[in-house]
Structure formats: structure tokens, C-alpha cells
Image: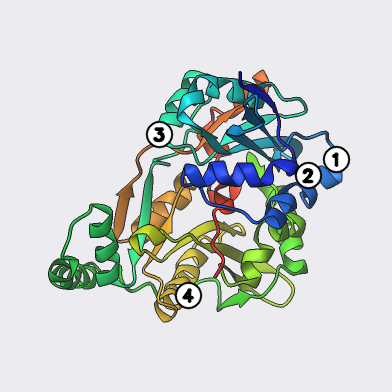
Amino acid sequence: MATIREASFADYGQIEALKARHHLSGYTEARWRHIYENNPLLNRRCLPWPIGWVIETGDKKIVGHLGNTPLEYEFNGKPLVAAAASLWAVDEAYRSQSLELVGRFFRQQHVDLLLDTTAVPLAARVLEKLGMKRPPVPAYDRTAFWVLDHERFLSSLLAKKRITAPGILTRPLAGLMIVAEKITGKCRLVSTAGGPVEFCARFDERFDRFWEDLRSRREGLLCVRDRKNLDWRFQEALANGAAWVLATGDETSLRAYAVCLRQDSPDIGLKRMRLADFQCAEGHLDALAAILSAVLARCRSEGVHMLEVIGFGAEKKARLEALAPYRRQLPGWMFLYKTPDASLAKELENPPVWDPCTYDGDGWLAQIKL
């Protein structure tokens, strides 16, 4: 007989083995502990927080898991506690207990906002039937992207479709893609709007000042972006080259910044960079083109095959899709939410309050180590 209990750090080895059986990305034990032990929300609020739940058999084998990532949010300046479901995996023989894991996630205390931002299609359908909703934003199931190495990108695409002899096919197709991009002009993203772009080695004091400005002028739902939260998410990836931080501004203030993450698909030989976050001061949305130009140039120099963007609210989404030459339909809608607060639920039905991206849930956890 299998039972459900809270997960503990002592479960690390078995949870990693379960994740490997289900082809989920692995963590070092130090990184897994970092998510909770160095979490800004838990350190500030001292909340009793379950790190997740496991299904355990009578002989102490873990056959199911659902992680529980704590996140700081604000709504119109009011602090919110959010929880993002992550790494939901259950062995086939125990799938009948999957909903019990979700029930534990839904019933936890001290949480204002429940999220699943990396839901696979089957999980998303189940969660929507259980009351989770899609934010009212355009096409979170459609990405915009740029191709930097056309032949290798096409090789990975053919490998995904299990088409053999890709070399014969990729060269002429790559040539056609390049010609089409030159005709449309979308392969040339050169802009000086917002001033020169710098690659930042760390999150300095300017990011705290930028956050204070952002939260003071923007109404709606915001995941906290102070230095503590930025460091907690990206410090390790920034140190090992798996994250890039770009900014425009001067020595004392920022006009815009972006964070990009390496999220490769090694099974098909694809090297991919994703735009995880972009924020700008009022009136500086044009800085997006300059930042993307700098990212694309570095992608080319470092042999990255594509740059991809998932999410964002209507205004940023429209600008990104105007700049990007390609679209990709995802298998399903990945970003879902639920709140036990009826008044907040009503507010969250309003499209302008949303600007969701990879930063806002657990999507940033899928980093690689270079």
C-alpha cells in the first residue's frame, strides 16, 4: 500500500531516480537545497513550507513526487505568497494517486496564489478540470524565435521528427531560410534605442533601484524582482555561463534589462537560449530591440543555434512577434493559476494585470551547467 507524505531533503536520491525514469532534468543536492534554504520569501517570512510531497510504497520506495517552489509576488503593491508546482512525476502503477498529490498542493496553508508554469499537456488538462485557469494573455502556447545556425537547427528539427540523412536536406533548406530572412529584414535586429547594451557580471544596486521604480508605477501582478530574488534564481547560472544578464542605462540607473538562460535539448543536438525576463522603465520598450540584437550577436559567436521567447503580456508579446521571424506552437498551454481569494480571483481576470514569463514560476529552474 502506497502512502503520501511531505518530502524531505533525505529523499534526494530517490526523487532524482524517479525524475530520471521520467526524463526530467536533474539537480545537484546543493542546488535542490538552495531552492528552499536560500529562498528570499522563506528567509523573510519564516513560513512553515513543505518542499513537496511524495508517494511512498510500503517498502519505502518513492514512486511519485510533486515539488513546491516558494515565490514572492505583489498585487498592486500588496505582498502575496505564491507556490509553483514543479517536477510532477508518478510511476505508471501509482497514477491513481496522482490527484492526491495535487490535492496536497491545493490545500497547503499560507499561500495566496497557486501556479503551474511548466505543465505538460496531460497535466494541464487535469489541472484545468480541478479549477486552475489560464491567464488572459495572448498565446502562451506559442513561442517566437530566431535561428542563428540554420543548418544545425534544421538537423535538430529532423532528429526530433526521426528523419534520417539530415545532411542532404538541411543545406538547401537552410539556404532558403536565410534568403527569406533577408527579404523580410527580420534577420537584422540593430537598434540604439535605450543606449548601449552591457552584459552584467552580477546584479548590482541598480537592479534594486529599478525594482522599486517598477513596483511603484506598474499596477497588477508582479513577481518580485529585487536583487535577492534575482540572485537566488540566476547567480549560479550567471557564474557558469548558462545565464546572461543584459542592461541599458548608466552607472546609477537602468532603463531596461533582460535575463537569458541556456535551455538546450541535448537529445536532438539543439543549443538554445531563451529570454527568461525583460523589464523596462516607462517609455523604454524600444530598448527590447537593442537588447535582442546584443543577445543574437553573442549567440552567433558562441555557437547557439536559436533564441526563443515564451510568454509575456499583450504589449511585449506583440513587439516580440513583430521582431522575430519564426513561431512555434507548443503542445499545450503551460501557465496556469488558482487563488483561494475570491477578490483576487476577480482582479486576475483582467488582462492588463498580467505579464507572465519564464521568470514568474519554475521555468527558470531548467538551467544547464556549461
Amino acid tagged 1:
Arg
Name which of mark 2 and mark 4 comes first in the sequence: 2
Amino acid identity at mark 4: Ala
Could you give the CA–CA distance between mark 2 and mark 4, rounded to whole angstroms? 33 Å
Nearer-N-terminus badge (2/3): 2
Tell me the element at label 3: helix
Task: Measuring from the top left, give residue 339's x and y in whole percent.
Answer: 64, 25
Secondary structure state at the residue bearing disc 2: helix
Residue occupying image coordinates x 74% and y 50%: 33
Q: Which mark is residue 294?
A: 4
| Labelled disc at residue 121 | 3
Q: Closer to the camera: disc 3 or disc 1?
A: 3
Which amino acid is tagged 3?
A: Pro
First in sequence: mark 4 or mark 3?
3
Which is in the foreground here, disc 4 or disc 3?
3
Q: Which mark is residue 45?
A: 1
Residue 88 horizontal/vertical position (percent): 55, 35
In this view, 230 is above or below 41: below
Mark 2: amino acid = Leu
Element class at badge 4: helix
- Above or below, 251 against 137 in this view is below
Image-quadrant location for residue 203:
bottom right
Q: Quadrant of the N terminus?
A: top right
Is residue 356 at least partly visible in the picture?
no
Kindly report the distance in space between the C-alpha atoms of the residues bearing marks 2 and 3.
30 Å
The crowd level at tag 4 (other Cα within 10 Å; few <14, some 14-19, many 20+) is some
Could one spot residue 362 in this view of the protein? yes
The residue tagged 2 is 41
